[in-house]
Image (cartoon, rainbow, N blue to C red):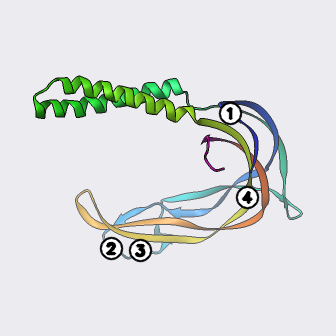
Amino acid sequence: MSIIAEGRRINQTLTHQVPVTNRVTLGEVPNDVFLSSPETPPLEQFRNRLPIVYDQPLVENGQPCMETRQTHFQASAASPLISGAIGGFAGVVTGWIVGGLTAMLTQNPNFLLGGAALGLAGGATLGAASASGSRVRLVIREEPIEQRQMTGVKTRVIPGTLKGEEGYFHRFQPEIVATPLGTYPKPQIEKFRIGDSQ
């Protein structure tokens, strides 16, 4: 990973390369069904089917085709003021509930206001402190370029109840094999806190 920029705000345009892709239907799987039997009928009998679609990389001479793009990245870290306000509100609600219960048990109404005030102060402090260490960064990570192929259909049978009737949910998933064709540098925005490991 390489860091391009970091801080409380990022506003940067990058020129980078991405794989050229083409949307391809690899195959179909039956829609999930609920049956009275745990035995799954032959898949050819299911009429309702779901297409399995992937963006496949275009390949020439065994190499993925790449194109140049220009992307604008803009992001901001959490605001201590807003986070403090949200934390304070959550603290007031929590303090009001805890203080209210204590006031009821002790017959002392001062616990109600004291709990709300303590919750406000604690929640606002924690919210602001949490946001004060938050940052954003624009990084580049290596992403895989993969050619996918559907090799079959995986079936899962789960006992259950539907509309008061007991039976079996038959769920279908494609079996996908990915062939690596290389990697490419992908820029992306990440949120982190000061002191976190990369």
Q: Earlier in the sequence, mark 2 or mark 4?
A: 2
Tag 1: residue type? Gly
Q: Which residue is mark 2?
A: 37
Q: How many numbered circles are shown? A: 4
**Mark 1 vs mark 2: in front:** 1
Classed neighbour count for the residue bearing mark 1: other residues with Cα under 10 Å, few (<14), some (14–19), many (≥20): some
Q: Earlier in the sequence, mark 3 or mark 1?
A: 1
Q: Position of residue 22 (x, y in %)?
A: 74, 52
Q: Earlier in the sequence, mark 4 or mark 3?
A: 3
Residue 168 vs residue 48: left or right?
left
| As drawn, 91 above or below 27 | above
Tag 4: residue type? Pro
Q: Which residue is mark 4?
A: 144
* Residue 100 figure quarter: top left
Q: Which residue is mark 1?
A: 7
Q: Which one is nearer the viewer's eye here, 186 or 166?
A: 186
| As drawn, 176 above or below 101 | below
Classed neighbour count for the residue bearing mark 4: other residues with Cα under 10 Å, few (<14), some (14–19), many (≥20): some
Q: Residue at coordinates 35% horizontally, 74% vertically from top-left?
A: 38
Q: Which residues are magenta?
A: 189-198
**Mark 2 vs mark 4: in front:** 4
